[in-house]
Image (spheres, rainbow, N blue to C red):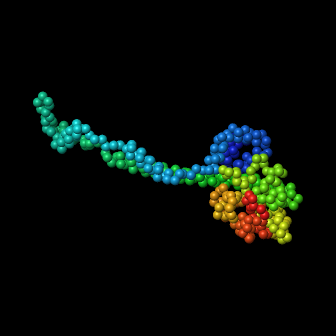
Amino acid sequence: MSDEDLIDYLFDVLDPADRSLVAARLNADPSATARLERLRATVAPVLTAARTEREDAPEPRPGLALRTLARVAQHVVEHEPRKSEPAPSDLAVATFLREFASSPPTEIEFGSGTRAKVPADRTRTAPPVTDGPDPQSGRRLRIDLIVAAGIAFLGFGLISSGIVKARQQQRVYACQNNLRTLHNGLAGYADSDPQGRYPQIGTAAHPTADTFATSLSDQGHLPAGYRPGCPASADYIAYAYTLGFRAPNDEILGLRRPDALAPAGEEHDLMPISGDFPTANAAPGAGPVSPHAGCMNVLFVGGNVRTTTSPFVGPGGDDIYRNLFGQVSAGANRSDAVLGRPGDRP
């Protein structure tokens, strides 16, 4: 693995497939991990600046378009060619040339009184006379500059919009990859649990939704330094996590690993287990919202990650942030999916 690959990994410019390959190589090769840390220390200032710019993309200031066009117009007015006023001697010469052009003389008198005839075949039409620059040229120049400035501004706006969209999409991809890594840790935890259950919320050790990752980290199911939240956010934003469901005897249970031999109605691959916080429109109440503005990434038990703008992506169109009673609490039954934010309890 080259240093260029590691640098691209650090600056998060790889596509999801290549980034997954690099991450797998780092997990399997301690020497590559050591090289990555050395590079991270070397480019730390640049990396910090790039992360800040990526997470908080600057928006054009209000009125930038009008100020730009006004500045261009001012520059044109100050630098356009001016019509020069002819000197008195120039006016006399211009008058003579006009008269010469309208009726060419047959004789020319010199200062000594000597006269000379001008042959008829030697007379020439005088060139067009002008008193200064064409006043229309400055006007055309000004119009051309204003049109060019407008085109340049339009192009700048299109490019800026494309950059913002690309950065937003890159943040979504980064969080999707982080959720896939989280699924690997959850799967490892379920494999080691006698009943095949994922970390359960509501216990003395993990009372709220934001404590689920502690079990994974304590048992070594997550990579060193892994943060259970969106890594492309300016501030650390954790992921929402399942609050479990209530059994018929009112006992709160956590989700289990899907079993193909389990009876119908048991846990299945399409049950949401974690994801981004809800968007402002989908949030069931006050609290942190998705860092992706209008969309959310949702992780399902089967390992699939889906980007959605609607919270109704649970089994049968279930709202994944509220139970069947519209509450932020454990699901009313095994198929009622509810993801809780930090501080939420079953």
Q: Position of residue 148 (x, y in %)?
A: 44, 49
335 relative to 173 in the view: left or right: right
Q: Position of residue 90 (x, y in %)?
A: 24, 38
The residue nearer to you, when weighing 3 against 311, is 311
Quarter of the rendering containing residue 36: top right
**In the rendered view of the protein, which quadrant contains the C terminus?**
bottom right
Residue at 70% x, 41% y is: 40
Q: Position of residue 114 (x, y in %)?
A: 11, 30
Quarter of the rendering containing residue 187: bottom right
Residue at 68% x, 64% y is: 285
Q: Is residue 258 above or below residue 3?
A: below
Which residue is the extreme one toward the top?
Answer: 112
Q: Is residue 154 visible?
A: no
Q: Is residue 229 visible?
A: yes
Q: Is residue 97 above or below residue 267?
A: above
Residue at 39% x, 50% y is: 143
181 relative to 309 in the view: left or right: right
86 relative to 338 in the view: left or right: left
Residue at 52% x, 50% y is: 156
The residue nearer to you, when weighing 105 against 220, is 220
Which residue is the extreme one toward the left?
Answer: 113
Quarter of the rendering containing residue 242: bottom right
Question: In the rendered picture of this protein, how many numbered marks are placed on residues?
Answer: 0
**In the rendered view of the protein, which quadrant contains the N terminus?**
top right
